[in-house]
Amino acid sequence: MVSHPITLLAVFGNQVNFVVPSSQPDGLALLSIGEGPHNFVPVLANIARQAPGIFAANANGQGVAAGNVVRVSADGTQTVQNTAQWYASTSSWMAAPIAPPAAGDQVNLQLPGGLAGAGQVNVIATVEGQAANAVTISFQ
């Protein structure tokens, strides 16, 4: 068995986020997750070079997106807003209302590093069911 150390990004609830070492080959891997030298839980995971995904607020990959909207004003000031809001009364995450941008505002996306080597990729933005023009980006 080969062992690779990982870079831990975050741990919360029953979710662990970490960076898979580039030396780890694709395919099934047995992870040992835990704290302390003797308290480990074995977890079987499928490792792939690219596995794009969007974080969900409830940590199951479905439902309300977990993220932030950063608004940058003309004077450079920034306002951050969460895309999800926790409602204790229903014990659930709900989408936080986000005010649409004023005319002339632009949307900037942070693209994941996992797109490296993807070649030509289609990009389409959709707002309230209205799709913008499709464009392509080429990744090395």
Image: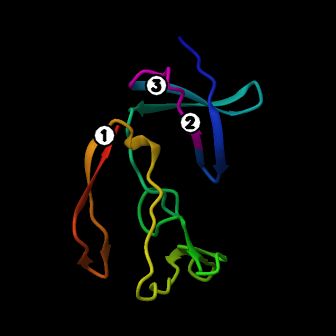
Q: Is residue 74 magenta?
A: no
What amino acid is found at the position of numbered circle 3 in the picture?
Ala
Residue 62, above or below 114: below
Q: Residues within 10 Å of mark 3 (few under 14, many from 20)?
A: some
Q: Which residues are magenta?
A: 17-26
Query: Mark 3 or 1, which is nearer the eye?
Result: 1
Q: Position of residue 50 (x, y in %)?
A: 37, 38
Residue 112, above or below 39: below
What amino acid is found at the position of numbered circle 2 in the picture?
Val
Residue 114: name its quadrant.
top left
Residue 123, above or below 126: above
Q: Main secondary structure of the magenta part?
A: loop
- Image quarter (top left, top right, bottom left or bottom right) of the C terminus: top left
Q: Residue furthest top?
A: 1
Residue 89, above or below 140: below
Give whichever of discs 3 and 2 has the lower sequence position: 2
Asked whether residue 91 appears in the rendered view, the answer is: no
* Disc on res. 100: none
Q: Position of residue 29 (x, y in %)?
A: 46, 25
Query: Which residue appears at 64% of the width and 44% of the height?
Result: 9
Query: Which residue appears at 44% of the width and 85% of the height?
Result: 100
Judging from the image, what secondary structure is the residue with disc 3 in?
A: strand
Give whichever of discs 2 and 1 has the lower sequence position: 2
Residue 40: name its quadrant.
top right
Q: Separation of disc 3 and disc 2 at Cα?
A: 14 Å
Q: Position of residue 88 (x, y in %)?
A: 63, 79
Read off the residue under disc 1: 118
Read off the residue under disc 3: 29
Judging from the image, what secondary structure is the residue with disc 1 in?
A: loop
Q: Residue furthest right?
A: 36
Color scheme of the displayed model: rainbow
